[in-house]
Amino acid sequence: MTGTSRTLPVTDLSLVVLVGASGSGKSTFARRHFKPTEIISSDFCRGLVADDENDQSASGDAFDVLHYIAGKRLAAGRLTVVDATNVQPESRKQLVQLARQYDVLPIAIVLDLPEEVCQARNATRPDRAGMPRHVVQRHRRELRRSLRGLEREGFRKVHVLRTEEEADTAEVVLERRYNDLRHLTGPFDIIGDIHGCSSELDTLLGKLGYENGSHPEGRTAVFVGDLVDRGPDSPGVLRRVMSMVSSGDALCVPGNHENKLGRYLKGRKVQHSHGLAETVEQLEREDAEHPEFREEVADFIDGLVSHYVLDGGRLVVCHAGLPEKYHGRTSGRVRSHALYGDTTGETDEFGLPVRYPWAEEYRGAAAVVYGHTPVPTASWVNNTLCLDTGAVFGGKMTALRWPEREIVDVPAERVWYEPVKPLTTEAPGGREGRPLDLADVQGRRIVETRHMGRVSVREENAAAALEVMSRFAVDPRLLAYLPPTMAPTATSREEGFLEHPAEAFAQYRADGVTKVVCEEKHMGSRAVALVCRDAGAARERFGTDGPTGALHTRTGRPFLDDTALTEVLLGRLRAAVTAAGLWEEWGTDWVVLDAELMPWSLKAAGLLRSQYAAVGAAAGAVQPLARSTSPPRARRG
């Protein structure tokens, strides 16, 4: 090795643990190769807690501080280097556990320098000149006992430097994580679960503009996994996707079905269930003409990465969904969640595991696009999108154009595999794959919001809201939007004013509002109009037969009691939207309008008849009696 420079690859987000006896040059090595802010030294932490970097009695508290700081850095996604002897297995075990806790790779750099070198270096340092010789000897004995077992302890990379020259000439090279493709900006076409439906895949690729697996405009396909099983031609799908990945026209993440197929191809014992039997049979037919294909598939699956972070961090693609804390992280836990998702531990009436609804709690900045759990229609939920629309079950094969956020799909040619659980149910919300559930609104609830943080809803308030919505609201399938109430300024401090313009403008300015539009006040009633292009669009999108939309108040109640009159109003709105060309401009077949309906008397007439008339009649009936009894009562005090 004389005269040869060692290259030490280090993952850009990892916990680097320096290991070596006192005097082996760990601190010098760290300063040479890492930023000062990336290094956490046990000596420095001793100084923090004891004002003396060599006070060994403070080591316990010092390492508590070291682990705390390291944890904060790893949580923030920062490369962290621990500069301590770390020659004892127990001290390394805590650091490996810390790396696992934050889903980063633990990497060991060992400075196994000769005892004479360590002793000589210590002798030149005033604070260690009197260090007993047996201390370095003990460190080296503990290190030598540990060297062969570092990978078994959990370190993903181990670099050992044994001479001064190796340590002085070594070069640390930061490596990008396999899942970090932020430098790729697309545009992308992200394709949902395929499950062996090669014909539908060809149709979808053609609709997306691909010619023989390549796009003339340089777009890149991204497959979310579950290429195989259940469908008629898993080898054909694999051949197409593998070819596109090999040529640079596509990326692919693994699904749970690829993971299982990969274990089967390696000779592991797996159950031939959930469609694997069909894939095995299809591969056996391939063996006669293409005996090498099986090994090529095994190598392809083995090289797939759990998830990708793309487009400057604005897009994450995985198979089963991924909470924000796992984005760009590397651990078995992250891979497991990306492949299988999380469950509640329960099973539904079909014997299937109940998936934990992580997307409903997601508040991350990156859009997460995934598959795994079949849904009838792809729709955005909190900046997440599931693209598995059940092609193999007779549904659709769906893709997302990014960054356009345009959804493209093609229908299945037939039902290739009967699903255990129907894709849709008749329950409200069932057409979107998420039927309404009483547990979602019952009892005390805590709702995580993007702008207001955690909002607590008391049980009595939830019960009252549930009663109002269940007894008085329009069909919940048509309740796409509930508007907020108006936000007036605070009560004026000016005598005689409820609100004052000067204070109102000051309030807007303080809230960061840069433009205020003032217009003449008209007496109207707040009305939300859901307008579908036609009855077919209402049926397709909202699952209703008959109404072509809804007209409701800000609390979700029908605006008008007369359904026929409601349809007349919706018809006039529909004609206006059509005449303005908004269906085509917005690329939609339904719109929601938050507006005021004028004149107010249109609503007032109904209120007068249904509410105020009865009050007036009762008042008129009791008024003569009240007048006749008032004077005697007044005289009696």
Image (cartoon, rainbow, N blue to C red):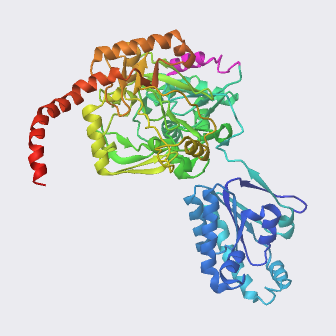
Q: Is residue 466 above or below residue 17?
A: above
Residue occupying the point 78% across, 74% down: 24
Quadrant holding the C terminus: bottom left
Residue 439 rendering spot, x and y as whole percentages: 31, 44
The magenta stretch spans residue 200: yes
Residue occupying the point 29% across, 40% down: 466
Q: Is residue 32 above or below residue 597?
A: below
Q: How many marks?
A: 0
Residue 470 rendering spot, x and y as whole percentages: 27, 35
The magenta-colored residue range is 197-216
Please say whether residue 244 is visible from this viewpoint.
yes
Residue 601 rendering spot, x and y as whole percentages: 34, 21
Nearer to us in this view, 521 or 546:
521
Residue occupying the point 52% across, 17% down: 199
Please say whether residue 231 is visible from this viewpoint.
no
Residue 566 horizontal side relative to residue 169, left or right: left
Residue 343 rendering spot, x and y as whole percentages: 40, 46
Residue 17 horizontal side relative to residue 235, left or right: right
Q: Residue furthest right?
A: 3
In the figure, residue 87 lies in which quadrant?
A: bottom right
Quadrant holding the N terminus: bottom right
Nearer to us in this view, 543 or 533:
533
Q: Is residue 92 above or below residue 329?
A: below
Nearer to us in this view, 394 or 295:
394
Nearer to us in this view, 294 or 455:
455
Q: Is residue 250 above or below residue 632?
A: above
